[in-house]
Image (cartoon, rainbow, N blue to C red):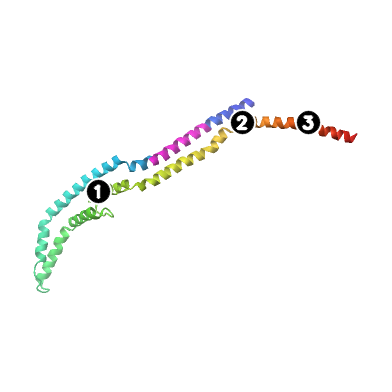
Amino acid sequence: MEYLNEETYESGKSKLKVIICIILIVGLAIGGGLIYLGINRTNPERIESLTNELNVDKEELVTLKNSLTEKNKPTTDEIKKLERVPFRGFTEDYYENQDKIAELKESIKEDTKTIEDINYVFEHGCTFNHNTNLNKYCDLYNTLEKANDKTYSIPFYMFGGFVIVAIFMSILPFIFILKGREITSFMTEQGLPIAKESVEKMGPSVAKMAKDIKDKIK
């Protein structure tokens, strides 16, 4: 029975070691990963790479803007020409002129909106974006803004550190269970000399007390 109990104890001890190792590895991986993400987000090489990508995409948007402007130039010129027609009352010619202007503006509405959006983000940044042509540029712009903001990485450091500390705290009970026998043995070994010394000191006193009681009985 003693052998079986010892065998069970050693088997449980081995399983507990495996559990502790798994928890430790997973915790360090998650916590370390979060800290690495925080460091990587403000990495100078990453910032330089994002800046280069942003400049390339900005050039592409400038090219798109110039292309749309050139393509719609005849239409915008025609609109300006019609808008310069002198007003001579609400005649049939006036309403025809207004309808023509509205039709021409509608035909270049999307291109005009794209040009306006490009001008806006170049001047004010990507505070908002509803144009698919600007998705890549604004994604890069916002990512670069965060990369340049050192405080943006603080939450990653905090959560990463918290996970690591929490993991170590969570495995402490398992370690105490694992080392329970050794701790108990150590405490017993430390207590034995004290107990022995106490018994040795108490021996004569107990003997004297017994002798006094015996004399009184007599």
Q: Is residue 96 above or below residue 8?
A: below
Say whether residue 8 is left or right of residue 23: right
Give the residue at x 56% y 33%: 178
Q: CA distance from mark 2 to mark 3?
A: 30 Å
Left or right placement of residue 179 versus residue 63 in this view: right
Secondary structure under the numbered disc 1 in the rendered image: helix
- Regarding mark 2 in the picture, which secondary structure is present there? helix
Which label sits in the foreground, 1 or 2? 2
Judging by the rendered image, the residue that carries numbered circle 2 is: 186
Q: Is 188 left, or right, of 110 in this rendering?
A: right
Query: Which numbered mark, 3 or 1, is in the foreground of this view?
Result: 3
In the picture of the structure, the residue carrying the numbered disc 1 is 137
The kind of secondary structure element at disc 3 is helix
- In the rendered image, the residue lying farthest to the bottom is 89
Q: Magenta stretch: residue 21 in it? A: yes
Magenta stretch?
16-35
Earlier in the chain: of badge 1 and badge 2, it is 1
The residue at 40%/43% (across/down) is 157
Question: Which of the pair 149/170 is nearer the observer?
Answer: 149
Q: Return the residue at label 3.
A: 204
Q: Is residue 192 left or right of residue 106?
A: right
Q: Quadrant of the N terminus?
A: top right
Mark 2 and mark 3 lie on one chain; the one further toward the N terminus is: 2
Quadrant of the rendered structure where residue 130 is? Answer: bottom left
User: Splitting the image into 4 quarters, where does residue 98 fall?
Assistant: bottom left
Q: CA distance from mark 1 to mark 2?
A: 66 Å
Q: Are marks 3 and 1 in contact (CB under 8 Å)?
A: no
In primary-sequence order, the first of circles 3 and 1 is: 1
Find residue 117 and report its horizontal and vertical position in percent.
22, 55
How far from the left and from the top, in percent, is residue 10? 57, 28
